[in-house]
Amino acid sequence: MLDDGPLTRRMPEPLLAAGFFAAATAYGAVVSIREDVPGEPLGLRVPLTVSAGVVLGWGSGLSAPWPMPAAALLVAADPHRSAGPTAGRVLAAIGAGVVTGTLIEPITWQPQRWTPATASAIGLNLIAAVILIRLGRRPAAAERGGGIAGHRTA
């Protein structure tokens, strides 16, 4: 592959995945605030407005708490850390947390309440989670000798 400068370099996959997750989280937060979809994991309600829940790190019915994408971006932004197995495990754990969080939100199981934006937010969250999990598993597989074609771990 040609590598003549910044315009021809590829962005590292962990950073792309973390960026996509951050964008999905931001989109979900906007939709939640606009459509008043509070975070109610397992039906647990806190006395916060949706916007306060988002800002304070509780999240919403359609978005992860902001520390999760922030952690993913921090791990993925460091090229030395992002190529190693620890970063992969962190990304996979965050992805698994997003799947779990999405599944325990009541809005996920109430499609009669979904608008197109709500359905999109749920879908984007799950897509981002699967990407984080799959990408996070690559360094661990390479460490065990399973080596993933096209993925550098050094």
Image (cartoon, rainbow, N blue to C red):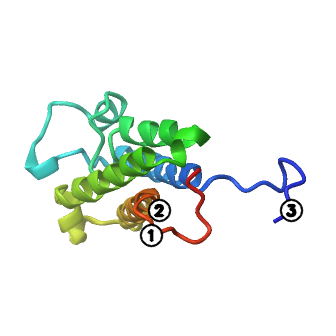
Residue 12 placed where, x, y %?
Answer: 63, 53
Q: Residues within 10 Å of mark 2 (few under 14, many from 20)?
A: some
User: From where the camera sits, is residue 143 visible?
Assistant: yes
Residue 44 placed where, x, y %?
Answer: 9, 43
Q: Secondary structure at mark 1?
A: loop
Q: Please, what is the three-letter code of the amino acid marked with disc 3?
A: Leu
* Extreme-front residue of the structure: 145
Residue 60 placed where, x, y %?
Answer: 29, 44
Pointers 3 and 2 in contact (C-beta within 8 Å): no
Residue 92 placed where, x, y %?
Answer: 36, 54
Choose the circle earlier in sequence order: 1 or 3: 3
* Extreme-right residue of the structure: 4
In the drawing, what numbered circle is on residue 5?
Answer: none
Q: Residues within 10 Å of mark 3 (few under 14, many from 20)?
A: few
Q: Give the residue pinned by disc 2.
A: 142
On screen, residue 77 versus residue 3, left or right, reads left
Q: Please, what is the three-letter code of the amino acid marked with disc 1?
A: Gly
On screen, residue 100 versus residue 81, left or right, reads left
Q: Give the residue pinned by disc 3.
A: 2
Q: Give the residue pinned by disc 1.
A: 146
On screen, residue 104 versus residue 131, left or right, reads left
Q: Please, what is the three-letter code of the amino acid marked with disc 2?
A: Ala
Up the image or down, 61 lies above or below 138; here it is above
On screen, residue 89 versus residue 15, left or right, reads left
Choose the circle earlier in sequence order: 3 or 2: 3
Gap in Å between the C-alphas at discs 1 and 2? 5 Å
Say which residue appears at 86% left-offset and 62% top-offset. 2
